[in-house]
């Protein structure tokens, strides 16, 4: 599926500054991909400036998740886990050495380019500066994962989230 080489500098340059906003006004995406649920409804994956937005349209319900530095203004800091009605997110931040960081970046680029339900965006300056999302139906709802990769001189930081939403 879609892997986009974005010609913009990433706006979010630190995984430690990411926040979470639910059901806030969604910003425009630099790259997006839409998935259709077999039971009806849509999910849109969106790459922001080294961050992401996911929106769900299901019958009369709408939902959005934004993980970005800007999201802190509308929600709060990205938690290790959070629950809301029909929704759950878990996040984990890890520092990787050069070899494992580059290997993960390569695997995520490959999956974004070739697998159904995946979206990726790379940023100028380092092909490991990457935001990747994947999603699939989960019963009547959806589940998705995201990876935010922030390279540095000795490898990089990876913020990984897993989320699910059910009506």
Image (cartoon, rainbow, N blue to C red):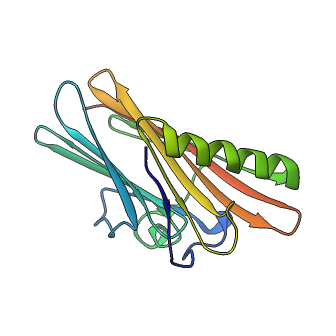
Up the image or down, 113 lies above or below 75; here it is above
* Side of 43 where 134 appears, left or right: right
Q: Where is residue 131 in the image (x, y as percent from the top left)?
A: 56, 57
- Residue 62's place in the image compared with 115, above or below, is below
Task: Tell me which residue sits at (89%, 63%) in the image.
Answer: 154
Residue 159, position in %: x, y? 65, 52
Q: Nearer the viewer, residue 112 or 43?
A: 112
Can the viewer see residue 80 in this picture? Answer: no
Position of residue 53 relative to residue 28, above or below, is: above
Q: Position of residue 165 (x, y in %)?
A: 35, 36
Q: Can residue 160 be seen in this view?
A: yes
Q: How many marks?
A: 0
Quadrant for the N terminus in the image: top left
Identity of the residue furthest to the left in this view: 60
151 or 20: nearer the viewer: 151
Front-most of residues 82 and 118: 118
Above or below residue 103? Residue 135 is above
- The C terminus is located in which quarter? top left
Residue at image point 32% right, 52% down? 64
Identity of the residue furthest to the top in this view:
139
Relative side of 152 to 83, left or right: right
Residue at 28% across, 66% down: 25
Q: In which quarter of the image is residue 87?
A: top left
Image point (35%, 33%), residue name: 142
Image x and y of residue 31, in percent: 39, 62
Q: In which quarter of the image is residue 84?
A: top left
């Amino acid at each position: 599926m879609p892997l986009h080489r974005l010609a913009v500098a990433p706006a979010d340059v630190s995984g430690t500054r990411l926040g979470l906003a639910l059901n806030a006004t969604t910003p425009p995406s630099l790259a997006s991909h839409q998935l259709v649920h077999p039971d009806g409804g849509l999910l849109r994956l969106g790459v922001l400036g080294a961050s992401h937005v996911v929106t769900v349209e299901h019958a009369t319900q709408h939902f959005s998740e934004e993980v970005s530095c800007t999201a802190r203004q509308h929600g709060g800091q990205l938690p290790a886990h959070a629950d809301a009605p029909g929704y759950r997110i878990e996040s984990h931040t890890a520092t990787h050495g050069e070899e494992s960081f580059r290997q993960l970046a390569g695997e995520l680029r490959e999956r974004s380019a070739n697998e159904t339900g995946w979206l990726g965006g790379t940023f100028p300056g380092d092909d490991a500066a990457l935001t990747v999302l994947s999603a699939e139906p989960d019963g009547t709802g959806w589940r998705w994962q995201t990876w935010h990769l922030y390279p540095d001189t000795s490898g990089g930081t990876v913020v990984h989230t897993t989320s699910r939403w059910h009506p």
